[in-house]
Image (cartoon, rainbow, N blue to C red):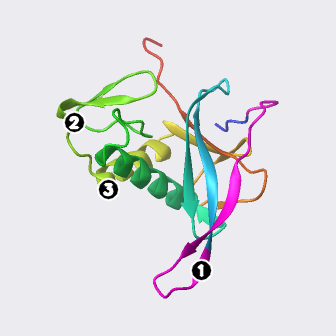
Amino acid sequence: MRFVRQNVPLVFLQSQTFVVDHSGGAVMSTSLLVRDETTSGQTVHESVIEFLTERVTVRELIRSRVYQEVQDYNRGADATFRGLVQPEGGIARKASTDVVGNRAIDWEVQYQRAVEAFESNQVLVLLDDRQLETLEDEIVIRPGSAVSFLKLTPLVGG
């Protein structure tokens, strides 16, 4: 099953900045606004991810996103965990997760859980309202592009 959302306006945020590499040279990085959305198009969370290239795979996008959100939480930047997937032992809230005991989260475990969620269609990734279907699908970050993550919840009863 493919998911395509029609006539939903998306706000775009993409910029280029320069990062100094270890040899002292400047490397251009590309910023991409990443959203968590409901299936009706409502944004529940946004974050910006920096990439050193304008071409990334879905796997690289998920890895970068999960790494950043776990690092932000572990450093205390966020009081609640707003991640792509719920960590083990977490208590789900509407747009976040309370982590029991405020323990550190392992980004690699979260990354594996996120990959499994993507592969089992529990999480969809949309580029400009087009569903990306494999971890190796390529994303080209262009002016006007937007990436959205949709978390699907199984229906109870059915």
Q: Residue at x 43, y 14 (%)?
A: 156
Label whose residue precedes the other's in the sequence (1 or 3): 1
Q: Nearer the viewer, mark 1 or mark 3?
A: 1
Q: Which secondary structure dominates the residues rendered in magenta?
A: loop
Residue type at numbered disc 1? Ala
89 and 80: which is toward the camera: 80
> Splitting the image into 4 quarters, where does residue 34 fall?
top right
Q: CA distance from mark 2 to mark 1?
A: 38 Å
Q: Residue furthest top?
A: 157
- Identify residue type, mark 3: Glu
The stretch drawn in magenta includes residue 26: yes
Mark 3 crowd level (few <14, some 14–19, many ≥20, 10 Å Cα): few
The quadrant of the image that shows the N terminus is: top right
Numbered mark located on residue 26 in the image: 1
| Residue at 51% over, 58% down | 59
User: In the rendered image, which residue does mark 3 sit on?
Assistant: 108
In the displayed structure image, the side of residue 109 where residue 135 appears, left or right: right
Label 1 environment density (alpha carbons within 10 Å; few <14, some 14–19, many ≥20): few
Residue 120 appears at what percent x and percent y? 47, 41
**Kind of residue at disc 2:** Asn
Give the mark toward the camera: 3 or 2: 2
Q: Which residues are magenta?
A: 5-27
Residue farthest along the left direction in this orientation = 101
Q: Residue at x 67, y 36 (%)?
A: 3
Residue at horizontal 23%, vertical 46%?
104
Q: Which residue is mark 2?
A: 102
Q: Earlier in the sequence, mark 2 or mark 1?
A: 1
Q: Is residue 140 above or below residue 158?
A: below
